[in-house]
Image (cartoon, grey):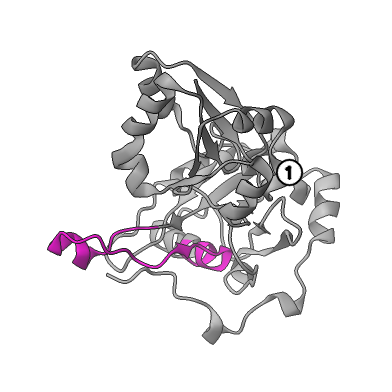
Amino acid sequence: MLYIVGLGLGDEKDITVNGLEAVKKCERVYLEAYTSILGVPKERLEAIYGREVAVADREFVEQGIDGMLNEALEMDVAFLVVGDAFAATTHSDLVLRAKGLGCRVKHIYNASIMNAVAGCGLQLYRFGQAVSIVFFTPTWRPDSFYDRIRENATLGLHTLLLLDIRVKEPSVEALCRGKKEYEPPRFMTCATCARQLLEVEDARGEKVYGPGSLCVAVARMGQDDESIKSCTLKEMCNIDMGGPLHSMVLVGETHPLEDDMMAMHRASETDFLPEDQVLSQYLEG
């Protein structure tokens, strides 16, 4: 049996009772560490689960997943996913491959940023399509998200922005030399996201949003030091939300209760960085 277990957003204690019971009876436990990160080291998971946890990084997911699926044909195997496996990031391909091999699969769901974002005070049924924002490079600046934001804005809906995570990404030089060398981990900040959004608006010029658009930043949702700050998009370019992971919402039409929540979360002057302390919005190369 392959158990696909959502871990929630906080720490080792956010796993559900059903999830914990499943993990404790598994002979192999893998932690997917490519599409998201947990706020605690894997050793804390091992302490509470009573099982050794193997990290399934990008290389494992791309090249070693068949070995895990073959194990699941013979024994109980747990594949742990930060948040929920079928929310912001889907692992449907894993399910299809497992079923194709004749492996039984059980899903154990949990909270993800897709529902935890409601903690900022915006009502979930007023959200439209979520979009992903990737790091720009000087020569690559994809803007397909702009069309989705426009569609949401036309309907007065909020847009959840899922910000880029780069973990164990091979460097261009390493790829050219055929070596296994990786860039340092990098996690997009809300400030970087805001700068990229405004750059695309300047280029497209359709006035889908602008410097005065209301937005809200959320960081480390579900953790003890979670942070929620609302401000204009221009102000967001200098927001300091601390460590990863960050997400952001472009706010659509609002209910009075949502207005009150946005006012409660209004960023203060001390929440903004001087211009010379804001990281570049571009990856090198």
Q: Residue furthest left?
A: 177
Residue 171 covered by magenta stretch: yes
| Residue 284 in the image, given as x and y percentages of width and height | 32, 71
Residue extent of the magenta highlight: 168-196
| Residue 169 in the image, given as x and y percentages of width and height | 34, 58
| Residue 142 in the image, given as x and y percentages of width and height | 35, 53
Viewer-closest of 35 and 163:
35
| 11 over 5 or under it: above or below | below
Viewer-closest of 130 and 209:
130
131 horizontally vs 171: left or right: right
Q: Residue furthest top?
A: 102
Q: Residue at x 60, y 28 (%)?
A: 25
| 268 over 274 or under it: above or below | above
Q: Residue at x 67, y 77 (%)?
A: 272
Viewer-closest of 257 and 176:
176
Q: Residue at x 66, y 50 (%)?
A: 251
